[in-house]
Amino acid sequence: MISSKIAIVEGDITQQQVDAIVNAANNSLLGGGGVDGAIHRAAGLGLWEECRRLGGCQTGDAKITRGYNLLADWVIHTVGPIWRGGNFGEDGLLASCYRRCLEIATQYEIISIAFPAISTGAYGFPPQRAAKIAVKTVKEFLENNSSVEQVILVCFTHGDYNYYVSALKEILTMDN
């Protein structure tokens, strides 16, 4: 049952006890503000050094590194789209971020993974819209791939938490 594989929590992604956490990174992968900065600070210099060797990442794609000082063994870095009004493929790029991270998780035999609310901070993606895309993409992936057993959607704010809970209820209800 898909609903048992998806959890939504309010909290700090760097403190999640999972195999991998997802970093909402910028194209350079070298740290920044928000989630990206918090993950780099918590992981330590080793993460920055490994990211430097990756040569950046395209929007909608993802790359994996070790977790260093984090509780998670792995960090999957993905670059979400900057919101430009919704007419520049932002929805598809955001869905691609979630899908690519889950594909990499499958490739690396990662059982549990935690995602932040990708692109909803400084990149300005409307959080309610982002929540629906995230939940729908994760659900569809889990329906067709059984290796990932637990996906945790970690919301830093209570407002984002409410959007994600609402999106999960709506999408699961549509299936019944």
Image (cartoon, rainbow, N blue to C red):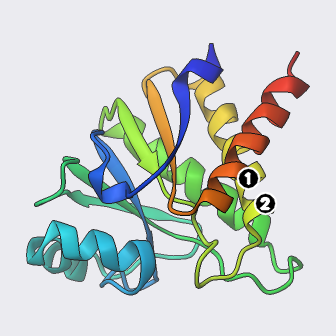
Residue at horizontal 52%, vertical 52%? 100
Instruction: Check the image and report above or below for 34 versus 118.
Output: below
Whichever of callouts 2 and 1 sits on the residue coming sooner in the sequence is 2
- Residue 145: horizontal and vertical position, in percent? 54, 25
Residue at horizontal 23%, vertical 47%? 72
- Residue 68: horizontal and vertical position, in percent? 12, 60
Instruction: Check the image and report above or below for 88 versus 16.
Output: below
The amino acid on which the numbered mark 1 sits, given as a three-letter code, is Tyr
Instruction: Check the image and report above or below for 8 versus 93.
Output: above
Element at label 1: helix
Assess whether mark 1 and mark 2 are in contact (beta carbons under 8 angstroms): yes
- Residue 52: horizontal and vertical position, in percent? 22, 83
The amino acid on which the numbered mark 2 sits, given as a three-letter code, is Gln
Element at label 2: helix
Residue at horizontal 30%, vertical 58%? 14
Look at the image and tell me in which quarter the C terminus lies: top right
- Residue 111: horizontal and vertical position, in percent? 35, 29
Q: Give the alpha-carbon distance from disc 2 to disc 1, as whole Å.
A: 5 Å
Residue 158, located in which quarter of the rendered image? bottom right
Q: How many marks?
A: 2
Residue at horizontal 77%, vertical 71%? 126
Look at the image and tell me in which quarter the N terminus lies: top right
Badge 2 crowding class, 10 Å Cα cut-off, few under 14, some 14 to 19, many 20 or more, is: some
Residue position for label 1 = 163
Disc on res. 110: none
Residue 121, located in which quarter of the rendered image? bottom right
Residue 62, located in which quarter of the rendered image? bottom left
Q: Nearer the viewer, residue 176 or 10?
A: 10
Residue position for label 2 = 128
Instruction: Check the image and report above or below for 73 versus 120.
Output: above
